[in-house]
Image (spheres, rainbow, N blue to C red):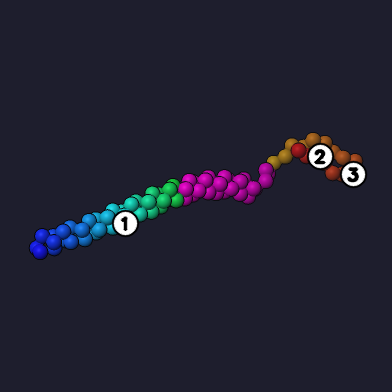
Amino acid sequence: MNHDNRSVDFQVGDLGTVFLESRLRETDDQLAEARHKNQRLVNSLGEAREQIASLKHEVDRLCAPPASYGVYLSDNCDGTVNVL
């Protein structure tokens, strides 16, 4: 009878091991999926950072004051001048 108890304990232990191995595989799959999503986010953030830097450069260029000098070209009959 004592031998039968060991057999039952061993079978229960096997079921526990199978359950834990199953959970480990599920956790590994979840971890792999999370790493894949994380890599996609890293790539997206890198692209967004490049776009923001490009847009900042464009805004800085558009906000720059106009050139404060010109080249006199000629007089007009109506009293105005042509400037480049």
Hey, what amino acid is under mark 1? Arg
Residue at 27% from the left image edge and 55% from the top image edge:
18
Q: Which residue extends farthest top? A: 73
Q: Residues within 10 Å of mark 2 (few under 14, many from 20)?
A: few
Q: Which of the numbered marks, if any, corresponds to residue 65?
A: none
Circle 3: element type: loop
Q: Is residue 60 visible?
A: no
Residue at 38% from the left image edge and 49% from the top image edge:
32
User: Relative to residue 29, is residue 2 drawn left or right?
Assistant: left
Q: Which of the numbered marks, if any, corresponds to residue 78?
A: 3
Main SS, magenta region, reads: helix
Distance (Cα) linking label 1 and label 3? 90 Å
Q: Is residue 17 visible?
A: yes
Mark 2 sits on what residue? 82
Q: Earlier in the sequence, mark 1 or mark 3?
A: 1
Q: Earlier in the sequence, mark 1 or mark 2?
A: 1
User: 38 or 32, which lies in front?
Assistant: 32
Mark 1 sits on what residue? 23
Where in the figure is residue 29, as x and y percent of width and height? Answer: 37, 51
Residue at 10% from the left image edge and 60% from the top image edge:
3
Where in the figure is residue 61, as x and y percent of width and height? Answer: 62, 45
Q: Residues within 10 Å of mark 3 (few under 14, many from 20)?
A: few
Circle 1: element type: helix
